[in-house]
Amino acid sequence: MPKKDIEVELRGEIRRADIPKIQRHLTARGFKLEKRFRRTMVMSFGYVEGLGQKLKRGKLQWADLRCRITNGKAEIMCKIGEGAAYNRREISIPVSKRDFLRFSEMFGSMAFFTKVGTRETIAYRKGPIQVALVKSPSGLAYFELEIMSSRKHEKKDIAKLRALAKEMGLKRIFGKKEFFAFCDKLTRRDDWRFTGTAKDLKRLAKEIK
């Protein structure tokens, strides 16, 4: 059986006021409330020049590194693939809160764009499909339809998610341009720039308590 380490996902903007209606649609389709959680993320993005046995100098590749705390549990994550792609591979390692802050300091000190953001999420599940309804402090909201897949089945699985989005009337699905525009909106309205300084670490430690 192919290894399922590819997160196939469909994302898009929703109105915060529409979340109760979407929850009713999910319940009517057999989705069950899986969990609610608060997540604070230190997100480091940027293009890096690949060097190595199989990489040619001058080829830029997208880097996406995350330090996350979800309901008090910390992890370090790397998402492999372009930022707006629907089929990225994820590698995650659990860490202590102390190491969370040390990794945050390290990533924030590198030549990436790094920011901190906190979200509240309501997650539903039916079989392998998870639907997350995410809210930011300023009132922005978005959905994530996700399924763990493999390279062999990723196209079939993204078709399933598109069909579900159509059934539920979720029309504002992000393309690459819309995805980055929405990320910029979150940066302006909710998130704060993090550079790994002592002042930033003190603010971060307070936010994750």
Image (cartoon, helix red, strand yellow):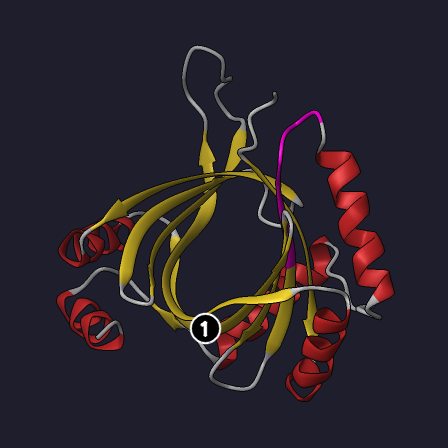
Q: Which residue lies most toward the top here? A: 53
Label 1 sits on residue: 119
**Above or below for 171 versus 21:** above
From the viewer's side, name the closer residue of 209 and 78. Answer: 209
The image quadrant where one finds the C terminus is: bottom left
For the residue carrying disc 1, how many other residues have a C-alpha within 10 Å: few (<14), some (14-19), or many (20+)?
A: some
**Predominant SS of the magenta segment:** strand
* Left or right of 7 on screen, residue 194: left
User: Which segment did they paint magenta?
Assistant: 145-152
Q: Position of residue 124 (x, y in %)?
A: 60, 65
Who is closer to the viewer here, 158 or 177? 158
The N terminus, quarter of image: top right
Give the x, y percent position of residue 194: 31, 65
**Closer-to-camera residue (90/157):** 157
Instruction: Point out residue 110 in the picture as x, y percentages from the top left corner.
Output: 29, 47
Residue 115 in the image: above or below residue 1: below
Instruction: Look at the image and say whether residue 191 sits in the magenta stretch.
Output: no
Residue reaching furthest to the bottom:
17
Q: Is residue 131 above or below residue 93?
A: below
Left or right: 92 in relation to 98: right
Query: Circle 1 — which element?
Result: strand
Q: Residue at x 84, y 70 (%)?
A: 169
Image quadrant assignment for residue 104: bottom left
Amino acid identity at mark 1: Arg
Identify the residue at horizontal 45%, vertical 26% (top origin). Answer: 50
Residue 193 drawn at (x, y percent): 36, 68
Decide which of 196, 35 is in the foreground and name it: 35
Label count reads 1
